[in-house]
Image (cartoon, grey):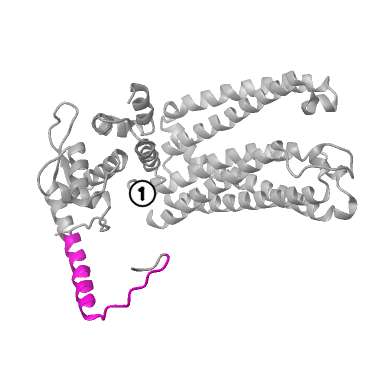
Amino acid sequence: MAEPRHVSVRENDPPFLILTSLISGPKHGYALMQDIEGFAGVRLGPGSLYGAIGRLEERNLIEPLGAVSRIRPYQLTSAGREALEATLAGLRTVVDEATMRLAKAPRAPRVIAAGGFA
Amino acid sequence: MTDITLRVLLRFYPRAWRARYGDELTCLILQSSARRSPSLRFLTNVAIAGLRERLRAMGLLGNDLTPWDRVQSGIVLVMWSWMLFVLGGIGVAKAAEYWKAAVPVASARLPEVAFTSLIVAAVIGAVLVVAGVALCGRTFAMLLRTGGWHQVRRPIYRASAISGLTAISLLGVSIWAHHLTFAQRNGHDLAYGVALLSWVVLFSGCLFSWAAAATSIVRHLNLKPHLLTLETRIVVAVAATMAATTVASSVWWVSIAHSAPWFFAGTAPGTAGIVALINLVVPVVFMLTATLLASVGARRSLRNAPFMA
């Protein structure tokens, strides 16, 4: 069996956001934009959205359903679901590690400077 | 949003992409801009995404196409860049006419070295381009033998027609120029200036129509991997000669601006001058742009060549 393909793992990457949005069911472009803005606070431009939809469709991670007039909803494929799970597993490892290290590390003194941490 | 804006925005995308996603994108744009007129950021997002799709379709971005196609796309980009570069080079050559007479002997060494380097690099580049074209000769002959002429004839006919027109108009402009004084030929005769500029536009069209014909031919050629690898090395060398020519042109320009600024002003030696003139700035910008594009194309070919096997 082929290894599941990862998608981009930055939390604001359009492919990752689209796959996440499609977990809850098929959506067309505008619904995807609104859903993503709702759960991630990221407003994708139409160009970025359809660029990512094209890439995901080419990689068979999502597929179109029958068109309703000019609107075409998309749904997650099983390969898309696997890719998302693999990506999340990778992310989870890093998140768990970061959480553990943060818990162990002593808190650094507050530094307020230009470009620094507060 | 007006229909015209929408149509213009969609034109940024390649035809195949429009056929597949055009309706959906149109719908999304209309839905998104239903309540308020779209912001500049919104419009830019759509346009830039369209340009990215075009670059992808051309094989200049992403890994959607095969390595073979990506290598080929890089070569084609270098070829187009070369055409732009030739235009810039002709402009520099024209702007540099009779420069030696204007420079004092004591300060002529640096511009002399720079100008000679410029010519040497340009000649090497031209030889490499000819070699690159010649390498495809056999495969092109094979394409013609297997009935490929009908696939490439249209851009070749078009380029030939524009070339004929360019040659005829060059003859006309040259005959006219022979009846003019030096000053009239160099900006003091408006009608001649307009005619010359029109010829330059025609000549540019001629160069780019051949580039389009060559692109069409390359797209239909079934070049073997070892030949493409060789072509890749040639385009890298061509990009290097373009960079060398651009640097030499810039050094020549700076050295003239420093030692003989009156040359750019067209005044007598020893008088006050200027450091630049538009006839030189535009060609050098062309050369610089072409060099940057060529380096992008050469890099694209070079990076993908190992994956062709």
How packed mark 1 is, by other alpha carbons closer than 10 Å (few <14, some 14-19, many 20 or more), is few
Dividing the picture into quadrants, the one containing residue B271 is top right
Residue at numbered disc 1: B62
Most frequent secondary structure within the magenta stretch: helix
Q: Nearer the viewer, residue B106 or B6?
A: B6
> The residue tagged with tag 1: helix, strand or loop?
loop
Q: Position of residue B102 (x, y in %)?
A: 86, 43
Residue at (17% x, 34% y) in the render: A72
Q: Position of residue B117 (x, y in %)?
A: 73, 52
Q: Nearer the viewer, residue A75 or B215?
A: A75
The chain letter for the residue carrying disc 1 is: B
The image quadrant where one finds the C terminus of chain B is bottom left
Residue at (32% x, 47% y) in the render: B64
Residue A60 visible (yes or no): no
Dividing the picture into quadrants, the one containing residue A110 is bottom left
The image quadrant where one finds the N terminus of chain B is top left
Per the rendered image, the range of residues in magenta is A86-114
A96 in magenta: yes
Residue A41 visible (yes or no): yes
Give the amino acid type for the residue marked by disc 1 in the picture. Answer: Gly
In this view, A102 is above or below A26: below
Residue most extreme to the left: A25
Taking B260 as reference, is B51 left or right?
left
Q: Position of residue B5 (x, y in %)?
A: 37, 26
B158 in magenta: no
Residue at (34% x, 46% y) in the render: B65
Taking B122 as reference, is B84 left or right?
left
Q: Nearer the viewer, residue A3 or A111?
A: A111
Residue at (25% x, 34% y) in the render: B32
